Amino acid sequence: MTTNSMARKYEPRKVPEKKVATSAMIASLAAEGYDTVAAPFGHALVDLAERDERIVGLSADLSKYTDLHIFAKAMPDRFYQMGMAEQVLMSAAAGLAREGFLPFATTYAVFASRRAYDFIAMAIAEENLPVKIACALPGLTTGYGPSHQAFEDLAIFRGLPNMTLVDPCDACDVAGMVPEIARHPGPVYARLLRGKVPSVLTRHKPDYRFELGRAQMIREGRDVLVISTGIMTMRALDAAERLATDGVDVAVLHTPTVKPLDTETIRAAAAEDGRLVVTAENHTLMGGLGEAVARTLLTGGIAPDFRMIGLPDEFLEAGALPTLHDMYGLSVDRVAEQIKSWL
Amino acid sequence: MSTRRVATPLSNVSVEQRAWNIRHKALRMGEVQGQGYIGQALGIADVLAASYFHAMEYRPEDPEWDGRDRFLLSIGHYAIALYAVLMEAGILPEEELETYGMDDSRMPMSGMASYTPGMEITGGSLGHGLGIAVGMAMGLKRKRNPAFVFNLMSDGELNEGSTWEAVMSAVQHGLDNLVCLVDFNDQQADGKATDAMARVPEEVKWRAFGWHAQRVDGNDMEQVIAAFDAARTFPDAVPRVIIFDTTMCKGVDFLEQREITHFVRVESDEWAKALNVLEKGRPQ
């Protein structure tokens, strides 16, 4: 039985001594010490749409919660409110793309990947149409429970031909990916960070900018190579700083494009002798970045010591996000602890 | 009010003759493969003839001309019928008829956009066409392009939730350039549509959702043409639907009388017999 099985349903509970914040639907991802940027997706889309008339925005009753409301307010005649109807959201985006437009469709990651999959597969991906699907609440970024935790979205979409997958780390990635995915001629599924999004990567690497399809070394290190995506790059960088004080030197290779994978860069980095290779993803260990990297390394004849950090093959619990990140191994403490245990 | 252009192509061949030609071509394709969704093709031939030879504007030599009326085949398994009308319209060369369903053919068993000129979308996974039609109709309005979008769907597709998302959406966005054509032959894979999920009459539902809805005999050309004209000229800013009651296998009496199923079995010697029966009903 998994941890959230029915077995504990009838156990009475006491008020805990340590009271943590209740699980907000939109929990803050901001780690301590980082500045934040408000709604980077919405503002980047408005900037781009001012230069590109083909861009239109659609949402299935979640524009406010995907930062698309910024676009809707700035360009109301280019925004389509599709109602709480994810299937027609995707079909209509396909229809608009057929007529020469460049639609950005937003909802939550669970609804795009689970509810609208057939419509993304057949109306968009099979036709290789340039629909950009941007989805909030990727992986474990809400404590609301399995209905809103898209812990398997990358696995679902990795199997879909023509689909490009992007998992941004921070505000710089989110803003930077908008023009990059718009320029890409095919469909894209982008995980979205919304609201106040931390600014992380440029603090560690001032000249960093997002490039579609490219993995980039954010931090060098001799002992361990972390290959990470999404918010786990943020966690890995923080864990690396902590491990450095213990004399462990950790490199972090940020891989925001999960498909197609930057095979060349990943193989070259992992081929360096003696480093433990660890993948880190805000996603189930089934079928996400870790398995993609493992395949890339093995088929490339590279077999380093290899470990994976990610979510277990379970429906996850509800609770406060920091509690859950600790529970499932995604917090900075747990990332550092796991890496140390493998050395 | 929707503006309307002159329907093309101009021809002295009657629409009834076009419908007969479509049936004839579909039967010949069925004969080539020894199978096919021939029951549906024979049933919908009159609606297809009226679409391509009365209601729609297009350029056979330029199937992607931006001014064309779009015809979406949501029901991929009706491809045999659409190939017949595309050949009749001069969009597909008739010389390729005998390649139907063969390896490397441009006419696979199920309709796909990437295979066939004039095939706008990939159908087959049912309940997709109307949603795509909604997006195309929105796009045409954005471009101030006066073309219509016609979406042909089956009664079975009315079971799909996605259809009703699209139905509501088309009204919400005032898509008066969208005409949905429903083939109500009362036959789904497992049996009668009315035994599956069509207890409430369809035109009642569509009207309740805000559509301009008509229900006519889809094998009576006069009614079919009048319905297309009414759908095109209705003045209000609402989408339009025509529900066509059709008879599976229409035009080939011994198949019409057979116990009708979703996939009508035709024995190998019966194709020639069916063509002979059709020949007797050729319009004068």
Image (tube, grey):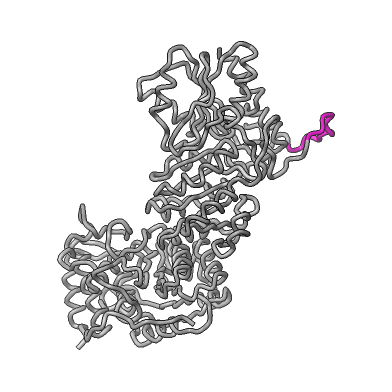
**What residue lies at 48% left-to-right and 38% top-to-bottom?**
A155
Residue B249: percent from the left, percent from the top?
A: 30, 73
**Is most of the magenta stretch helix, strand or loop?**
loop
| Left or right of residue B58, residue B241 in this image | right
Q: Give the side of residue B113 with respect to residue B3, left or right.
A: left
Left-right relation of A34 to A129: right
* Viewer can see residue A269: yes
Percent x, y for residue A32? 70, 30
Quarter of the image where the C terminus of chain A is located = top right
- Number of on-image labels: 0
For this rendering, which residue is in front, A310 or A80?
A: A80
Residue A15 lies in the magenta-colored region: yes
Q: Is residue B270 visible?
A: no
- Quadrant holding the N terminus of chain A: top right
Going 27% across and 83% down the picture, which residue do you hit? Answer: B15
Is A297 located above or below residue B157 in the figure?
above
Q: Position of residue B71 (x, y in %)?
A: 36, 69
What residue range appears in magenta?
A: A9-20
The answer to which image quadrant residue B5 occupies is: bottom left
Residue nearest the viewer, comparing B25 with A327: A327
Seen from the viewer's position, the closer of residues A70 and A342 is A70
Position of residue A39 relative to residue A227, above or below, is below
Which one is nearer the viewer's eye here, A7 or B118?
A: B118
* Residue at point 46%, 44% (across, down): A180
Q: Is residue A97 magenta?
A: no
List x then y, in percent, for residue A207.
53, 31
Residue at left offset 35%, top offset 25%:
A299
